[in-house]
Amino acid sequence: MKYGEEHHLKVLFTREQIQARVAQLGEAITGDYRGAGELILVAVLRGSVYFAVDLSRRLEIPFVLDFMGISSYGGVSASHGIVRITKDLDSNIAHKNVLLLEDIVDTGLTLNYLRRNLQTRNPASLRICTFLDMPARRIVNIPVDYCGFTLPDLYVVGYGLDHHERYRNLEVVAALK
Amino acid sequence: MAVITISRHFGSGGELIARLVAEKLGYLLVNKSVIAGNMRACGILEPELAHFDEKKIKFQDGEWDREMKERRRHYLAQLHNFFYDMAIRENLVILGRGGQFLFHDFPPALHVKIIAALQSRIGRVCRLYSLDESAAVRLITEQDRDRETYLRQIFGGDWLNAELYHMVINTGMTGPEEAAALIVTAARLRESAGEIPVQELEERLLEQFASPVCDSQGGGILYDAGGNVPLFAHPSETEFARMLDFYQIKWLYEPKTFPLEWDSEGTVTEAFSPDFYLPEQDLYLELTTQRQKLVWKKNKKIRRLKEIYPDLQIKVIYGRDFKGLLEKYGIKERGD
């Protein structure tokens, strides 16, 4: 059985469409931050890694690529009652421009926490760039500054998004049926 | 395994009555000193105990607040475990501490409320504590407010709700001996009414303590943004509140009811209370896990709500959305 055939995957965005959109985002971000000093790109582990790599290649400004990871909600059986940082930034972001990179914004719960956490470190500015936005699932309103694609409420995989750790490495974005 | 819970207004003589009942029936009296002895063995000492024992807690923001919640959670877990362990082995008279809520569905339990008019309590408190009248009034008001709020925070219940009790005794009209005799008679009548097999009682007790009123999923007590413990109507709401807590989003449970329809005399005939309010977002959330065909009625109400209160922000989380959320976090759905 070929990889991906155990689920019915419907391709929503091809490799070419994704690369074209990422290039547009890179161009927009380059324009907005040109001459504004060093930019810190904060990629949220693990889903945004593919997006962060491709997007950073399209930037024509100086930047530092850093990573941040937080624990996910695990229900009542979770050992901790509150979210934990599993990988903190290596960079000091105080007085720097920060661009938070997400693979997908859906409920906004994770991003709301990350945004508040990063704000306490006094960045000069903090903006959000997401590859996918799913506003239909939003619980907490979060301002998204840059967005690759807006999607209706679908379960999607590929380009960093997984289904039980599968399909992250697909070069396309597909809906899992 | 019989349990008599005695809830009392401060200065109503509840402690004395509890002691008399315990002596007459040969039951163990669980009062402040017995609890303190047990808590000491669990590492909870004075002055921390005095801070938590039947006391309301006013929560603020920040790290101290989180630590305080954790410590009280630990205290309550130890206290309620102690009640459970004792109830399995002994016949008890439990003074205060929410016994009427903890043993609410336990068949052999007898729940008693001791009340008295303020004037008669003032006299008793003046004599017992050598206070003048105004100091006695202050002490009574403070103690009653603490006890009432404590029960509301922990169990989400109103201690003045007469439906919680088998008997309410007014010690302004009844002396302590007479009050104790009434309780003893009631307890003996209940004893002789029929034996429930011990195994069944143990199961009932376990069931009751495994699912305390405030947290039906056994995951520790959930506090809203005001430091209160809400009584959730559905396990999905508990799960959702826990999720919001996890991501440190402040919430209140059903804080406001919005009138939707009025009759010709202006009396509200239909109203709607959204499940959650997120104060930082100024957003109301309605969680509905009903089957889709039953949702139309709620949708109709929400449409009406938006018409009457156009500035109000409200979002509906439907059953399939909530299911998707649980799937995302790898959680199996509970309680539906």
Image (cartoon, grey):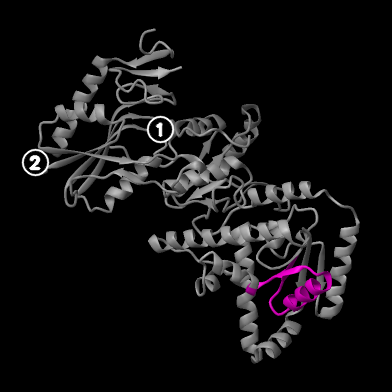
Residue B168 figure quarter: bottom right
The percent position of residue B41, horizontal first and vertical second, equals 55, 66
Quadrant placement of the N terminus of chain B: bottom right
Relative depth, front residue between B310 and A166 = A166
State left or right for residue B173 relative to residue A139: right
Relative depth, front residue between B167 and A25 = B167
Alpha carbon of mark 2 to alpha carbon of mark 1: how far? Answer: 32 Å
For disc 1, the chain is A
For disc 2, the chain is A
Q: What element carries label 2?
A: loop
- Residue B165 in sight: yes
Residue B132 figure quarter: bottom right
Task: Tell me the residue that label 2 is attached to.
Answer: A35
Quadrant placement of the C terminus of chain B: top right
**Three-letter amino acid code at disc 1?**
Pro
Query: Which mark is on residue B184?
Result: none
The percent position of residue A124, horizontal first and vertical second, equals 19, 50
Relative depth, front residue between B310 and B154 = B154
Task: Tell me the residue that label 1 is attached to.
Answer: A135
B253 is within the stretch colored magenta: no
Question: Which range of residues does the magenta coloring cover?
Answer: B5-33
Crowdedness near tag 1: few (<14), some (14–19) or many (≥20) residues, C-alpha within 10 Å: some
B107 to A22, vertically: above or below: below
The percent position of residue B143, horizontal first and vertical second, equals 62, 75
Residue in the picture at 80% in, 72% down? B21
Residue in the picture at 18% in, 41% down? A40
- Residue B313 in sight: no
